Image: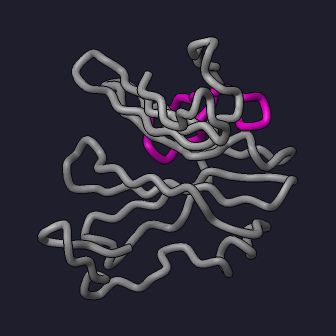
């Protein structure tokens, strides 16, 4: 992780050791690689939460979280909050949103061509109750990455397609 005071020059914060979750850690948990990070500030205004996907090609994947209250000088242990032990491309690009009551963890299921979300009362509990989002029919089924934001009472989703549809790759829904 790196930080900046001006958004232009980036450096590793003093006292931080990178990587925050190494490949050796992923291997020890039975995964081949880490990918698809998402960093948010929790509702307390002082705790950052880092979510990411750990995966093994074609076989399994998990979404993990760790937190820090001091700029990543110290951090919590990684905790798995969602798992799919049967396939690799069903939980791409996690995006986490707090709706005022629960956390929603959105993921792209590339294999099925859909976006799902799971809910949890806490940021680091087990996310459950899969809900499949209804997307426009013209949107490509080759979804790849996304981000979701709640602004006031409006939900915004930015979706990236791995396949061009009329030359387009990014869609704001």
Q: Magenta segment range?
A: 110-129
Residue at x 68% of width, y 81% of height:
24
Residue at x 82% of width, y 60% of height:
57
Front residue (pair 54, 83): 54
Front residue (pair 11, 75): 11
Residue at x 32% of width, y 27% of height:
150
Residue 17 part of the magenta segment: no
Residue at x 73% of width, y 40% of height:
90
Quadrant of the rendered image containing residue 126: top right
Front residue (pair 165, 95): 165
Quarter of the picture holding the C terminus: top left
Quarter of the picture holding the N terminus: bottom left
* Residue 77 placement (x, y as % from top left): 51, 67
For the question of whether residue 105 can be seen, the reply is no
Residue 120 part of the magenta segment: yes
Q: Is residue 104 left or right of residue 80?
A: left
* Residue 44 placement (x, y as % from top left): 22, 46
For the question of whether residue 163 can be seen, the reply is yes
């Amino acid at each position: 992780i790196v930080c900046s005071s001006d958004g232009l020059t980036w450096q590793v914060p003093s006292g931080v050791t990178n990587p925050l979750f190494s490949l050796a850690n992923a291997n020890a948990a039975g995964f081949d690689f880490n990918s698809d990070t998402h960093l948010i500030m929790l509702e307390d205004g002082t705790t950052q939460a880092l979510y990411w996907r750990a995966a093994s090609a074609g076989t399994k994947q998990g979404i993990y979280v760790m937190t820090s209250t001091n700029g990543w000088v110290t951090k919590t242990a990684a905790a798995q909050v969602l798992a799919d032990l049967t396939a690799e491309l069903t939980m791409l690009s996690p995006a986490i949103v707090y709706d005022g009551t629960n956390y929603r963890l959105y993921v792209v299921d590339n294999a099925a061509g859909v976006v799902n979300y799971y809910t949890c009362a806490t940021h680091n509990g087990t996310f459950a109750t899969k809900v499949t989002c209804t997307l426009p029919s013209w949107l490509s089924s080759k979804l790849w990455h996304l981000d979701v934001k709640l602004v006031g009472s409006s939900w915004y989703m930015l979706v990236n397609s791995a396949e061009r549809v009329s030359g387009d790759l990014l869609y704001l829904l």
